[in-house]
């Protein structure tokens, strides 16, 4: 077998394999791009062209018809050329009108040529030369269509050269190479070389390099750059955020410490105002006139209110500063709750309300007794404060391994939109009936923080004009059985 046959077969086979691989890469990378699809069309048409060209050299061995083989390879070659020219025009996009005209002309003539090559009478004397090369004579019409293809290639190369688009000039050179492929038809000396296959393989490779660079590598590099830039921005934002977080935490800590100090400083003189007002009212320093004792009662009441507010602020700032220490002990909650109920009893009675105690079965808790008292007192005093008729109740039971306490009232209730906020600091519900709430908006916030410090939960269920129920869970003291388990 002549070595040129082997060379030509090898070139054709490699062209087919490479074209298939490149087509898959280009389509996989972006099948939505029109230029990619046209280029893939060119590559995919090169595959059957290459395989047919290989087989044409072995028609005797495989008992094939040479003229059929030449028709097949020529048809696919023409299709490949159509796609290449369409791709060039599309890529150049020099002016929309020229591009469309060039594409339309190519498509019409190329379709006619394809039909002619597939069925027409253009092939004369197809044979394998002594050098193993496929040889045939073509009709003048065939040569004419080749000249047309060459001129369209030149036109598309011209469009590429003048295009503004990035990469167009890089495509100009491989496209300009293509007409070389036809040289064997016009220059007899080159007849023995697989010029067409060599040229097409080179064009496919060089063009794919540009397409892949523009469509794949450049965008990837750009993406990488953008990613790095946004990463930098994110890092910077994170640093800023961390810094301002630290500043905020420090400011918060300073504020809490300041509040704690101030509350302490305020409480001392207030206690003496309360103490002396009380003594004055009791007549320790002599009798008072009605007006004096009335005004002094105001002083006493307002000072007590101020003291409560300061105490709340002190507690809250302690909790916020992380300085609230709990002294957890096991204790029986029943007498503690009894004392609380007794404390509020005068108020309950003065408003004509009923009170039900349903907590006698509660087992010992493990909690800070004073803080537990404070939580329950806040809830009980709210219940009295916001209830005008009906019944209050305090229930206690064990549920899911925790003590569950419920303070129920038949008071004004809380509108649904406020429910999720009432445990926030300084949050008060302003309604028509309570335009200025008598409290400070701190009681529930403190209760929630204290409950959470104990590992419990606090929540509310409420209906306007029907009443509210505040639920609290608290840890139980370990029993001998639970300790054994
Ligand atoms: P305040 O000192 O204002 O009572 P709290 O934090 O204790 O502050 O309560 C927040 C708000 O929740 C109150 O202003 C009130 O509007 C509402 N609230 C609390 N308890 C009840 C209740 N039992 N019935 C109706 N509203 C309540």
Image (cartoon, rainbow, N blue to C red):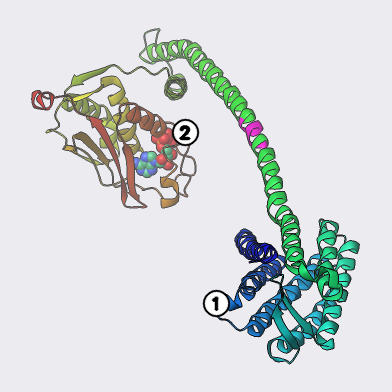
State the residue at coordinates (67%, 77%): 73
Q: Is residue 119 above or below residue 426?
A: below
Q: Secondary structure at mark 2?
A: loop
The region drawn magenta spans: 233-238
Circle nearer the N terminus (1, 2): 1
Q: Is residue 164 magenta?
A: no
State the residue at coordinates (69%, 91%): 119
Is residue 405 visible in this depiction of the protein? yes
User: Between residues 93 and 49, which one lies in front from this camera angle?
Assistant: 49
* Quarter holding residue 102: bottom right
State the residue at coordinates (25%, 39%): 406
Q: How far across and down, in percent of the image, does residue 157 sit?
A: 86, 66
Q: Which label belongs to residue 255?
A: none
Ligand 1: give its quadrant. top left
Q: How far across and down, in percent of the image, does residue 439 sit?
A: 44, 34
> Circle 2 is placed at which residue position?
425
- Asked if ligand 1 lies within 8 A of label 2, the reply is no
Tell me the chief SS of the magenta region. helix
State the residue at coordinates (9%, 23%): 480
Is there CB contact under 8 Å for labels 1 and 2?
no
Q: How far across and down, in percent of the image, does residue 136 sit?
A: 75, 81
Question: Closer to the observer: label 1 or label 2?
Answer: 1
> Circle 1 is placed at which residue position?
62
Q: How far across and down, in percent of the image, does residue 29 sit?
A: 62, 58
């Amino acid at each position: 077998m002549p070595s040129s046959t082997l060379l030509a077969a090898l070139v054709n086979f490699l062209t087919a394999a490479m074209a298939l691989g490149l087509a898959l890469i280009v389509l996989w990378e972006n099948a939505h791009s029109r230029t990619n699809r046209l280029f893939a069309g060119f590559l995919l048409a090169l595959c059957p062209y290459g395989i047919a060209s290989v087989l044409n050299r072995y028609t005797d061995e495989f008992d094939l018809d040479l003229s059929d083989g030449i028709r097949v390879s020529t048809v696919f070659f023409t299709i490949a050329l159509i796609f290449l020219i369409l791709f060039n025009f599309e890529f150049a996009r020099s002016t929309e009108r020229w591009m469309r005209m060039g594409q339309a002309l190519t498509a019409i003539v190329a379709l006619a040529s394809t039909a002619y090559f597939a069925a027409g009478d253009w092939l004369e004397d197809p044979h394998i030369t002594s050098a193993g090369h496929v040889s045939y004579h073509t009709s003048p019409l065939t040569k004419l269509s080749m000249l047309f293809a060459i001129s369209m290639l030149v036109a598309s190369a011209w469009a590429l050269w003048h295009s503004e688009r990035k990469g167009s000039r890089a495509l100009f050179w491989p496209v300009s190479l293509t007409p070389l492929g036809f040289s064997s038809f016009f220059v007899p000396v080159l007849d023995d070389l697989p010029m067409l296959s060599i040229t097409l393989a080179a064009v496919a490779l060089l063009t794919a390099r540009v397409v892949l660079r523009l469509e794949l590598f450049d965008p990837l590099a750009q993406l990488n750059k953008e990613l790095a830039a946004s990463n930098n921005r994110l890092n910077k934002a994170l640093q800023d955020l961390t810094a301002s977080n630290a500043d905020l935490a420090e400011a918060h800590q300073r504020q809490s410490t300041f509040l704690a100090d101030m509350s302490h400083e305020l409480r001392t003189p207030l206690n003496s105002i309360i103490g002396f007002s009380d003594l004055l009212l009791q007549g320790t320093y002599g009798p008072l006139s009605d007006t004096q004792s009335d005004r002094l009662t105001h002083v006493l009441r307002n000072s007590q209110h101020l003291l409560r507010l300061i105490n709340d602020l002190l507690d809250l700032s302690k909790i916020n500063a992380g300085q609230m220490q709990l002294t957890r002990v096991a204790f029986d909650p029943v007498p503690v709750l009894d004392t609380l109920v007794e404390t509020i009893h005068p108020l309950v009675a003065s408003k004509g309300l009923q009170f039900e105690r349903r907590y006698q079965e509660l087992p010992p808790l493990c909690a800070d007794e004073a803080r537990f008292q404070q939580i329950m007192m806040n809830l009980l005093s709210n219940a009295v404060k916001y209830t005008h008729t009906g019944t209050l109740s305090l229930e206690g039971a064990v549920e899911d391994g925790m003590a569950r306490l419920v303070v129920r009232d038949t008071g004004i209730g809380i509108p649904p939109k406020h429910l999720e906020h009432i445990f926030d600091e300084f949050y008060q519900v302003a309604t028509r009936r309570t335009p200025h709430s008598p409290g400070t908006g701190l009681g529930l916030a403190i209760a929630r923080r204290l409950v959470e410090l104990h590992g419990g939960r606090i929540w509310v269920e409420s209906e306007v004009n029907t009443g509210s129920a505040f639920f609290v869970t608290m840890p139980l003291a370990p029993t001998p059985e639970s300790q054994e388990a």
